[in-house]
Amino acid sequence: MSVTDPHNGQSAVDVDSQETREWMDALAAVIEREGPERAHFLLEQLLEEARQNSIDLPFSANTGYVNTIEPTEEARCPGNIEIEERLRAYMRWNAMAMVVKANRHHPEDGGDLGGHIGSFASLAHMFGAGFNHFWHAESENHGGDCLYIQGHVSPGVYARAYLEGRLTEEQLLHFRQEVDGKGLSSYPHPKLMPEFWQFPTVSMGLGPLMAIYQARFLKYLHARGIANTENRKVWVFCGDGEMDEVESLGAISLAAREKLDNLIFVVNCNLQRLDGPVRGNGKIIQELEGEFRGSGWNVIKLLWGSNWDPLLARDKDGALRKIMMETLDGDYQAFKANDGAYVRKHFFGRDPKALELVAHMTDDEIWNLRRGGHDPHKVYAAYHRAVNHKDQPTVLLIKTVKGFGMGKSGEGKNTVHQTKKLTDEDIKIFRDRFNLPIPDSELPKIPFYKPADDTPEMQYLHERRKALGGYLPKRRVKADESFTVPSLETFKAVLEPTAEGREISTTQAYVRFLTQLLRDQALGPRVVPILVDEARTFGMEGLFRQVGIYNPAGQQYTPVDKDQVMYYKEDKAGQILQEGINEAGGMSSWIAAATSYSTSNRIMVPFYVYYSMFGFQRVGDLAWAAGDMQARGFLLGGTSGRTTLNGEGLQHEDGHSHILAGTIPNCISYDPTFAHEVGVILHHGLKRMVEKQDNVFYYLTLLNENYAMPGLTAGTEDQIIKGMYLCKPGAKGDKRVQLLGSGTILRESIAAQALLEKDWGVAADVWSCPSFNELTRDGQDADRWNLLHSTEQQRVPFVAQQLEKHVGPVVASTDYMKAYAEQIRPFIPKGRTYRVLGTDGFGRSDFRSKLREHFEVNRHYIVIAALRSLADEGAIPMAKVTEAIQKYGIKTDKVNPLYA
């Protein structure tokens, strides 16, 4: 006799079958008389005893290739399965029709809008069970469940909403045709359908990652008494191929560690990814079972439908179970791409005993042996078990067929994911497979089908959603609650000049602002400080004791620094989210908090601070998703710029995050130099995002350099927000230049101002430009207006407005790539020379002064650039430039920093 390893399907020889039988009988007796809990305890004791006796081979985290829930343990579905099956057929048809119509009826535009049929076909039963029996909408008595819907199945969700009367036939006819405002987005996009989709999920892997932190944030809200979230669930639909994305599995240990029993993953295991099998030579379900169970999750496998149960009951010697385990995924795919005779020969035919089990069945009956995901009773039972499980997150590994019901055109085939055009014969087969009441004469039109409102199906559809609080998916656009942001004067600690001899950094200014905001009785509790293990770097360790670090288990140990004022304090109701060394996790927590106004009807104000180099560059896809989700909050890139992190080097020095931030339309970004700029910008952001509930989020870069702060000049607040104000006017003089700067390099421009006047008799006005991105957007907006309104009064970009009364060439210098400040070139007043200095190239480690010399952005290079610009305009001799180069020891033959 041989036994099969449930993990790898390999057989091992049983050298004493009688002894094995005795052990098995003993275990069965314990289960029968004392229950599974006692049996589990005894097995754990045996394993521990084995380890104590040096039997240290690892035991598998896998179970057999069968359903986790025995037929006798299945909760029975209380619904009308017959009606649900008919409704499901209508939805399948309408989803298919939507995609096929979009790709068949527009030859003038190429007739190809894309779309997907196969994915929804594989999980229609899973959606049916959820929508009919489990998924709560937001109502008076329930905060609503969160649904992370697999992106490629959007046609199926639209098809359901059409039957519910939430979408019109015209909208379905405009699937993937959004420009004129009538259409439906290709995938879940809150930005494009703000009252429908909650979460963007089609950037593979981000949905699972964001959902874990969303579930954790719901627990956070409840623990802090901000919202009652105890009955809410987060449901996450993923494809088995999607689980190869590192983000999909990257945070599953967090979910188990924090006992997120409000989290349910549903992995649609149709064994196919976009181009072919997920694990042709393996078993993806077994692999995922090991991953999740090993991380502490509750794992429920649903592999086989009800008509397999009699066969498994008669499989006394395990021949069928052995074949199930040893068959590879690539073969399972081939079975569904062929027919019953093929399955009889190549599956059951692997063992005469298994073949005997189906001897009484026809080929058609064998072909109709369903996988578990296409059995409504089994799916209901799996969901029921999941929602009632406590103290662990649950993953449902549900086996399906990709393209179920699509027949020869795609069912189980490698090409099914790309299938979006069906032949007339395919459509007829589809109609017949699901018994749709559409006559042959209508089939060429591929009509949408919707029963009359008074039919039993439609009444049942609405009754089920009424019982669950309303329709889904549905998104809240604004929170019902409101707050008044404290006045700007409240933050005077960062607005006033620093005392003589005192120096601070803009990071310290941010911390002072945040500390003051936390003291506000109304808004303070809604602040969510988010850290990724760099609190001490940013001088924020004082918050540990002040508001505590959230930990659902509290602090069960005595911290090593307990005797210090700023000790490491964890608390069940802590306010800080400390994510460890984990930027993706920090960003996901920030997104959950930044969209809480929508998901939980609670306005929260997240502040996520991190090394700026590890922000948009590392989690840019999440930042883009945040824009799609209409997130509201603050991202703060600390120790920013290419030349500020003396000693850290190439991997840490950021010279391009503002360029990346500028690619996200609703991200408002600033590179402030002074404390008062930080205060004004943060306050303005609060006014927009909290009071006005504008759908924007803010990115600020912060510095770790200490210097004296000049304080706010009254009347410049609006100019700071627009991106540019005159911070240090120059002396009187005929020869004049305009120096623009931001962040740390603005101070080099101020130093250059003094050198120009002292050494060369040139006056310079210095402009602080906290946001070249905002200046660019303003200029582009004015340019567009002027293009489209040629006969009306032309708009003047803000840059031009600021500079038009200040003569002379313009030199812009930042700690970022030249492209950052180059953006405003078209908006500089005509006839003026515009020269840009920046930090193109890889960063490196050294002192700040050496780095600024290396990247050619220090005060001497600014002076050279100003003199050359004056010479180009004929205001001074070109020889003066050469003289200055010699005076400041500029190395003219060194390698361009871009290539160094």
Image: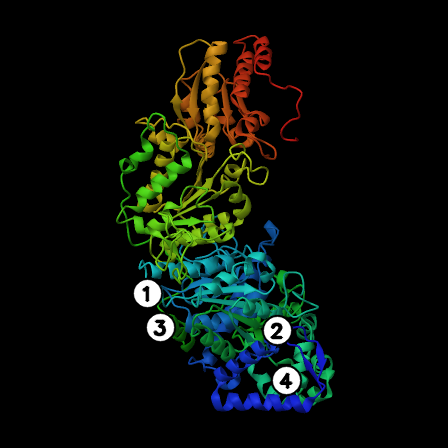
Q: Which residue position holds label 1?
A: 139
Where 745 falls versus 339 (above or below)?
above
Secondary element under disc 2, as helix, strand or loop, is: loop
Label 3: few (<14), some or many (≥20) within 10 Å? few
Q: Nearer the viewer, mark 1 or mark 2?
A: 2
- Say what secondary structure mark 1 lies in: loop
Pointer 1 and pointer 4: residues touching (CB < 8 Å)?
Answer: no
How many neighbours does mark 1 have within 10 angstroms: few (below 14), some (14-19), or many (20 or more)?
Answer: few
Q: How many marks?
A: 4
The label shown at residue 695 is: none
User: Where's residue 465, x and y in %?
Assistant: 38, 70
Q: Position of residue 579 (x, y in %)?
A: 46, 53
Tell me the distance, in whole angstroms, between the alpha carbons under discs 3 and 2: 42 Å
Q: Residue at x 59, y 16 (%)?
A: 889
Q: Which residue is mark 2?
A: 60
Between 133 and 866, which is closer to the camera in this rendering?
866
Circle number at residue 467:
3
Under tag 3, what secondary structure? helix
- Asked whether, in this view, residue 418 is left or right of residue 262, the answer is right
Give the mark nearest the N terminus, 1 or 2: 2
Q: Point out the frontmost of discs 3 and 1.
A: 1
